[in-house]
Amino acid sequence: KIHSIVLAPDFNTAEKINSKLSKIGNLSADGRPILGLDAKELLRIVLGASEDAMLIPAHAWTPHFSIFGAASGFDSLEECFEDLTPHVYAIETGLSSDPQMNWRLSCLDMITLTSHSDAHSPQKIGREANILDTDVSYTAITNAMKKRGGFTGTIEFFPEEGKYQYNGHRVCGVSLSPGETNKNNYLCPVCGKKVTIGVMHRVDKLADRKNGFKPKNAPVFYSVIPLAEIISETLKVGVNSKVVRNEYFKLLEIICREGSGY
Ligand SMILES: [Zn+2]
Ligand SMILES: [Zn+2]
């Protein structure tokens, strides 16, 4: 199972895609409809609706619902998309991986590493983002992703902030590095069940380069910590608490008043 992002150049294309997909599953059942078709077939439908439409594999490394995740079974884009692979121009790095980790795979050198909110709730919109130096149009933005011109970088979480950086067993509160996991035979040291294999482990497994490698002309990336998280850590209170919310808006007011010198 793979989460995918579909970009359509216009409503007509979106309608075409929707009408095809609604024969496969119920599109209105959920904000993220679940469809019983291979990602490759989804890509075929998307391209059939318009050659300008795009499919981007979402949060490419998370253990579940992602192309390279431990549970997906794919070790490369080609395994998943076969002859349609040249039509995949970008993957989303997701919250638990950053470009540096993806640079370790030479097979991703021609792939644009995008970052999006994966918001789930409104206050998280923009928590990760692409930095584009293009016209504000569908064609210009997708061309930047396809040809890299004008795709100048991304804003990223520290991968450690993501839920799936390490391996672990959440119900037991266990978190293991790839090395520790090998030593424990992929089993949880508390309950003995299989651990969930996280992002770092999968990158380690599929990488053909050492940690720290940087491809030539790679776009820059900036790692940021959400303001609410910083307040929460500083005041030692929960990130969803009222105290954090009040402080957050107080700081926003100051920043808006005094300009973006902060
Ligand atoms: Zn998802
Ligand atoms: Zn356990």
Image (spheres, rainbow, N blue to C red):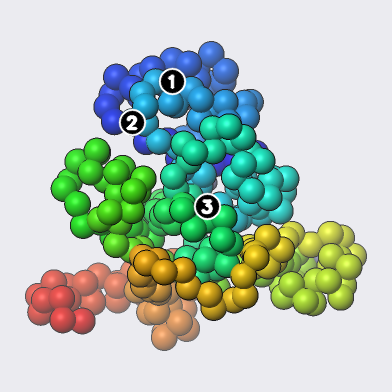
* 98 shown above or below 243: above
Mark carried by residue 59: 3
Quadrant where the N terminus lies?
top right
Badge 1 amino acid: Gly
In space, the residues marked 3 and 1 are separated at their CA atoms by: 24 Å
Mark carried by residue 162: none
Residue behind label 3 places its C-beta within 8 angstroms of ligand 1: yes
Q: Which residue is mark 2?
A: 52
Report the residue that reaches farthest toward the front. Answer: 216
Q: Nearer the viewer, residue 107 or 10?
A: 107
* SS type, badge 2: loop
Q: Position of residue 125 (x, y in %)?
A: 34, 54
Circles 3 and 1 in contact, beta carbons < 8 Å: no
Which of the 4 image quarters holds residue 132? bottom left
Position of residue 234 in the picture relative to residue 12 (left or right): right
Mark carried by residue 48: 1
Q: Residue at x 66, y 52 (%)?
A: 69
Q: Position of residue 168 (x, y in %)?
A: 73, 67
* SS type, badge 3: loop
Among the two numbered marks 3 and 2 on one chain, the one whose residue lies closer to the N terminus: 2
Circle nearer the viewer, 3 or 2: 2
Q: Position of residue 158 (x, y in %)?
A: 48, 73
Which of the 4 image quarters holds residue 114? bottom left
| Any part of residue 242 in sight | no
Badge 2 amino acid: Asp
- Badge 3, how many Cα within 10 Å: few under 14, some, many 20+? many
In space, the residues marked 3 and 2 are separated at their CA atoms by: 22 Å
* 251 shown above or below 69: below
Q: Residue at x 52, y 56 (%)?
A: 108
Q: Residue at x 36, y 23 (%)?
A: 50
Circle nearer the viewer, 3 or 1: 1
